[in-house]
Image (spheres, grey):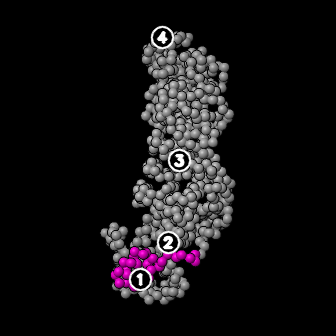
Amino acid sequence: MILVPDTSVLIDGRITSMIKAGEYKGATIIVPEAVIAELEAQANNGREIGFSGLNELQQLCRMAEEKTIELKFSGIRPSLEQVKLASGGEIDAMIREIAIENSARFITSDNVQAEVARAKGLDVIYLKPQVTDFVPLAIDQFFDEHTIAVHLKERISPMAKKGSISDMKLVKIRDAPTSEYELRMMAQEILERAKRDPDGFIEVEKRGITVVQIGSMRIAIARRPFSDGMEITAVRPIVDVTLKDYTKSDIITKRITSEKRGMIIVGSPGAGKTTLAQSVATFLSESGYVVKTMEAPRELQVPDQITQYTTLEGSMANTADVLLLVRPDFVIFDELRKAEDFSVFADMRLAGLGMVGVIHANGVQDAVQRFSDRVDFSVLSQVVNTIIFLKQGVITKVYDVGFTIKVPEGMGGEVHLRPVTTVTDHETGELVLDIFRYDGQTIVMPVMGITATAPAPVAAPQIRSSPQVQNVGQPVTAAREPMRAPAASPEPACTKETSERPGWKLTEKEIQREIGRYTDGFVDVQMLSDTKAVVYIDDKDVPAAIGKGGKNISAIVNKLGIGIDIKPRSEFDRQQPAQKTDEEFNLGGGIKILTDKKQLTIVAPGESGKIVDVFAGKEYLFTATVNETGEIHLAKNSSIAQEMIKRYSNNEVIRLRPV
């Protein structure tokens, strides 16, 4: 018997198994050079299927040496033009020609190749996908009922994550390290199973990385140059959870089956978001809704009646176009990462489909920030009605997203009524986030300990006293005092308060240091309470200090645990009484400071032409060169000049020391 296998058979790996079983013992197997060229090209591109096919070919060579079969190579290598036309079937045609020339039986596991060969009059052996009688994979030996994930890398002992989502540990499962040969054999076996198993498929196949889904197990195979060594990572669920098993499941079921059909599930990696998403999908399907999924890769373990879609021609936008024609009741989007994903999610929700999305984020603010950067904040409440936050597999918070017209919290004296998207705790009604436009940017402002109420048409809402709380992703804050309007002359009041509260002085310096990274000018801080401060900086630096979407100021608020209002210096100047533009300060020793409208001049005739260090008390301020006329000139609005004036006003001695 003469057999000509195509590329799919060698990648599939079943031909050697059939020879070992005695089915084709003594046969003459002719391997076309086009097959070898195709496998070589795939291996050179780092694709695991190329290495799998070459391993199968090596086994055939060993069988030929043992006289089990006769192995021959025939044909010519494909030209560059034929390689370019491979997707159109040019190389497949070269392989079929070898079978015709040798009057051989053509063996393939590619359905299209089999149909074309039959049309050409060839005797075809078509190896159908195997449905039953699968033996356990070699990687299965590392799993037990408590194992969530297995990590295998060459020259490293096998490691596994065991336990539950809430209590997970990384443990060594074997002292002997895994070898590259052992990993190659496992990888080949995994790929062969993915080709044969109806529940198996290759999700990602790129240079150096292959991601395979076999049943409930997701396996990533990495090799050089993508990784520094060969590595196999396998992950699988260990429990089957229904939606009723979750706390707060009654809130989810009530909201998702009402008109509020836009939901996102938020949590850090490994928090159990995918498990909750598949529980929601199963609940909706069992409740009589048509449910589809959008996944890349497809990893949700859902009933067969739920069809799982992935990217179409590399784009989720194309998948969305198809789903809008299919018209399901709900779509589960796992997970939203790229900017296109957020736009697709919003478009499908606004088109009327129920949407459940999964987002990686450490807190609700991070998740809303990712959305607000890509979707206009004014339609956010129409896209997302409910936010579910998970931690270690437990639903810790449920948030409502709404829309209103009001003055954003903490900005009563700076902005007027405007559209604001709000995020509130579903159970307590406390306001967590305000999202609004300010100075051309979308601000996501954390608000702590405030009960959401309808906005008053004239006055800014008052902050009620509240117990110590901690919102997800926000620092713990103490009870807040009612907000008071700033005094007409804030500077003296602030100075008095600061002298009475020494801790405020340290806080002012911390705020000056953090805000000073975004401005070259002087940072004026006024403490209103232990948890509230107003900061005045140069008008042009206000947008930079706030940051895109309020990112910079939010990071400072979270770091220091203090609410901060950023205001332009022009507003502070309007509050100050008129001052003389020209002033003179005598420092003693013939040294004095002169100021006018634009400039501060240090007059030190005895230091002409010298380089001097300038000190305030014992603290070094800066180094400068005294000109020939005995003067040092500074811009009056510079941070150095403002600091000198402030230090002198605080009765600190300003002195010069030659270097």
The numbered mark, 1 or 2, whose residue comes first in the sequence reads: 1
Report if residue 124 lies within the magenta region. Answer: yes
Q: Which residue is mark 3?
A: 260
Where is the N terminus found, in terms of image quarters?
bottom left
Instruction: Evaluate whether residue 603 shows in this view.
Output: no
Q: Which residues are magenta?
A: 106-134
Report if residue 269 lies within the magenta region. Answer: no
In this rendering, which labeled residue sits more in front, label 2 or label 3? 3
Q: Secondary structure at mark 4?
A: loop
Residue at mark 1 to residue at mark 2: CA–CA distance: 19 Å
Q: Which residue is mark 2?
A: 195
Q: Secondary structure at mark 2?
A: helix
Q: Amino acid at mark 3?
A: Lys
Residue 235 % position (x, y)? 59, 61
Q: Amino acid at mark 2?
A: Lys
Mark 3 and mark 4 residues within 8 Å of each other at the beta carbon: no
Mark 1 and mark 2 residues within 8 Å of each other at the beta carbon: no
Q: Secondary structure at mark 3?
A: loop
Residue 323 % position (x, y)? 44, 58
Q: Residues within 10 Å of mark 1 (few under 14, many from 20)?
A: many
Q: Residues within 10 Å of mark 3 (few under 14, many from 20)?
A: some
Residue at screen point 37% across, 81% down: 118
- Residue 580 numbered mark, or none: 4
The numbered mark, 1 or 4, whose residue comes first in the sequence reads: 1
Foreground residue among 170 and 352: 352
Q: Which residue is mark 1?
A: 124
